[in-house]
Image (tube, helix red, strand yellow):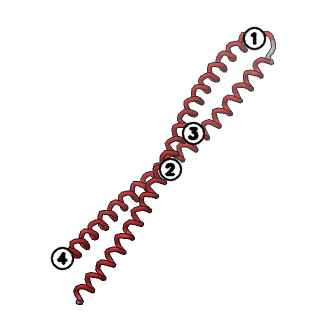
Amino acid sequence: EQALDQYKEQLDQQVQEAEAALREQRAQCEQLQTQCQHTQVQLEASEENVAALHKDLKVLRDAQAAVANDSKHAKERFQQEAAQAREREEAVRRELQTVKATLEDMEAEVKEMRRQQTKLKAEAQDKDARMQLLASERAMLTQQLRAIQAE
């Protein structure tokens, strides 16, 4: 009877520890989900920035084409504007590369966060199942203990 009481106390302690671990994992899961949503917002903003940069690049190319059609006496002005347009185009390309790299990093972060979230959910499900098993064992032992005490 004393051994059953001790075993019941051990099971109660294991259940409490499992519940605490489960609460902690759920909090981590929620935090990851919040981070994931924040990163998703940043990702969408970066995609919009990329689209705007593409538009700027098209405008610059159109400007270069328009300048190329100017008359011969505007050749010097054209050369200056073309050089500036190339500089702006190069700056836009560099920024576009930076944004693309950032975008890829964010996508990798989102993928990793989703992987971690899936892992934490699976662990939480495992712990839920374990808690249910421990609770059913505790109930069975409590029933046996009562039966022994009734005798």
Evaluate if marks 3 and 4 touch, with contact meaning CB atoms under 8 Å apart.
Answer: no
Q: Residue at x 44, y 51 (%)?
A: 32
Which of pointers 3 and 2 indicates the residue nearer the eye?
A: 2
Which residue lies under the disc numbered 2? 114
The residue under label 4 is: 2
The amino acid type of the residue labelled 3 equals Ser
Instruction: Say which label, 2 or 1, has the lower sequence index.
Output: 1
In the picture of the structure, the residue carrying the numbered disc 3 is 46
The answer to whether residue 33 of the structure is visible from this angle is no
Determine the secondary structure under disc 3.
Answer: helix
Which amino acid does the dot numbered 2 rest on?
Arg
Name which residue lies at 73% across and 21% down: 64
Tell me: 9 left or right of 56.
Answer: left
Comparing labels 3 and 4, the label whose residue is closer to the camera = 4
Residues at circles 3 and 2 in contact by the CB criterion of under 8 Å: no
Q: Residue furthest bottom?
A: 151
Q: Residue at x 69, y 17 (%)?
A: 82
How much space separates mark 4 and mark 1, taking CA atoms? 103 Å
Q: Is residue 54 above or below residue 32?
A: above
Which quadrant of the structure image shows residue 60? top right
Question: Which of the two discs, 4 and 1, sits closer to the camera?
Answer: 4
Q: How far is mark 1 from mark 3, CA to CA?
A: 38 Å
- Give the image location of residue 143, x and y in percent: 30, 82
Instruction: Report how far apart the C-alphas of labels 3 and 4 lie in the structure.
Output: 65 Å
Left or right: 9 with respect to 58? left
Residue to which mark 1 is pinned? 75
Quarter of the picture containing the C terminus is: bottom left
Lower sequence index among marks 4 and 2: 4
